[in-house]
């Protein structure tokens, strides 16, 4: 990863974390991980995944494993969805956001039950709706602002 690439991802992370203060309970980092996976830069995606996972695990109140299950499911859904959809299709991102919103609700329900926590179902429900709605928007923003290399093939002019 070059210096400009590291600087771009640092800026993305800072902006996403600031956004999470505006939208508590919404993960704005996961769209960045998806953008990185779309670039097919495996080392970059692994590093970002670990950094984002540590940030979310460290700032959350659930026992260790919630972030791992969250990011793990996002990765599995993206890889599985690539077989059905074009990886950079906005409709795929809308569907992925909706499924992640449902997964978030199920995950919080399961983990709070295991830890014998109580949670406000309506608050968590609306956080999950916000997650589903902000995911494609944040993905679109990150994908549009991400510097791209020109394709080196016979069709590029």
Image (cartoon, rainbow, N blue to C red):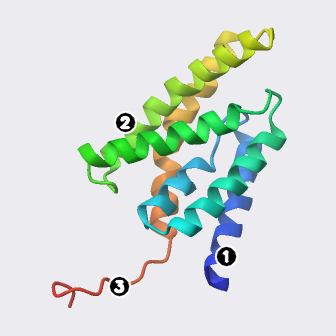
Q: Which residue occupies the foreground of this view, 124 or 69?
A: 69
Distance, label 2 to label 3, CA atoms, is 28 Å
- Which numbered disc covers residue 6? 1
Location of residue 116 with respect to 47 vertically, above or below: above
Location of residue 147 with respect to 24 vertically, above or below: below
| Residue 157 x/y as whole percent | 20, 91
Q: Residue at x 74, y 12 (%)?
A: 114
Q: Is residue 148 left or right of residue 54?
A: left
Q: Residue at x 58, y 27 (%)?
A: 104
Image label count: 3
Alpha-carbon neighbours of circle 3 within 10 Å: few (<14), some, or many (≥20)? few
| Residue 13 x/y as whole percent | 69, 60
| Residue 29 x/y as whole percent | 63, 50
| Quarter residue 94 falls in | top left
Q: Is residue 144 left or right of residue 88?
A: right
Alpha-carbon neighbours of circle 1 within 10 Å: few (<14), some, or many (≥20)? few
Q: Which residue occupies the foreground of this view, 47 or 55?
A: 47
Q: Residue at x 83, y 40 (%)?
A: 59
The residue under label 3 is 150
Evaluate if marks 2 and 3 touch, with contact meaning CB atoms under 8 Å apart. Answer: no
Of label 2 and label 1, which has the lower sequence position? 1
Q: Please identify the quadrant where the N terminus is shown.
A: bottom right
Distance, label 1 to label 3, CA atoms, is 19 Å
The residue under label 2 is 95
Of label 2 and label 3, which has the lower sequence position? 2
Location of residue 33 with respect to 68 vertically, above or below: below
Q: Is residue 43 left or right of residue 56?
A: left
């Amino acid at each position: 990863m070059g210096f400009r690439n590291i600087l771009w991802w640092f800026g993305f992370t800072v902006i996403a974390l600031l956004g999470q203060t505006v939208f508590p309970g919404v993960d704005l980092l996961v769209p960045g991980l998806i953008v990185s996976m779309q670039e097919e830069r495996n080392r970059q995606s692994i590093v970002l995944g670990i950094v984002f996972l540590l940030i979310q695990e460290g700032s959350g109140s659930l026992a260790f494993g919630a972030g791992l299950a969250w990011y793990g499911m996002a990765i599995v859904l993206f890889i599985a969805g690539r077989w059905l959809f074009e990886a950079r299709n906005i409709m795929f991102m809308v569907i992925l956001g909706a499924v992640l919103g449902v997964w978030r609700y199920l995950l919080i329900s399961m983990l709070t039950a295991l830890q014998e926590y109580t949670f406000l179902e309506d608050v968590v429900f609306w956080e999950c709706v916000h997650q589903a709605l902000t995911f494609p928007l944040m993905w679109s923003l990150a994908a549009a602002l991400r510097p791209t290399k020109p394709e080196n093939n016979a069709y590029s002019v």
